[in-house]
Image (spheres, rainbow, N blue to C red):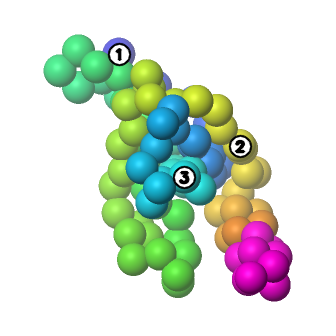
Amino acid sequence: MQNENIFGGKVVLFYLTDPHESFAGGIPVLDPAIDEKLGRKFVVGLVPSDPNDWSSGLSVGIAVDQIAHYLVFSSEEEFIKKSEMARIATSSVH
């Protein structure tokens, strides 16, 4: 199985089972697809554009067996808008 596209053109925020605290908020993937490497399946794609994220635009891969659940955003624009809303809400609580 090579590069099976599952959410073409969308951003999916994947939450991991037992994540390190730096990944507790999930890992966003733009245009995710399934790819197999060395007999193990990964969700692969790009980190969406975000001026607050140093990894924007880089390739990312998440082992499928580490995914607990996910949220689907219809576009990169929707993901950015909702991420900003969450940042504002979180900063006003602290």
Q: Amino acid at mark 1?
A: Met
The amino acid marked with disc number 2 is: Leu
Q: Residue at x 23, y 26 (%)?
A: 37
Question: What residue span does the magenta drawing correspond to?
Answer: 84-94
Mark 3 and mark 2 lie on one chain; the one further toward the N terminus is: 3
Q: 88 and 83: which one is in front?
A: 88
Total marks shown come to 3
Mark 3–mark 2 Cα distance, whole angstroms, equals 14 Å
Q: Is residue 1 left or right of residue 92?
A: left
User: Quick one: 54 or 30, which is closer to the camera?
Assistant: 54
- Packing grade of label 1 (10 A; few <14, some 14-19, many >=20) is few
Label 1's element?
Answer: loop
Q: Which residue sits furthest left? A: 38
In the picture, the disc for residue 1 is 1
Secondary structure under tag 3 reads loop
The image shows residue 41 at horizontal and vertical percentages of: 35, 22
The residue under label 2 is 71
Q: CA distance from mark 3 to mark 1?
A: 29 Å
Q: What amino acid is at disc 3?
A: Ala
Q: Is residue 79 visible?
A: yes
Looking at the image, is mark 3 or mark 1 nearer the viewer? Answer: 3
Q: Which mark is residue 24?
A: 3
> Which of the image's four quarters has the C terminus?
bottom right
- Can you say which quadrant of the picture contains the N terminus? top left
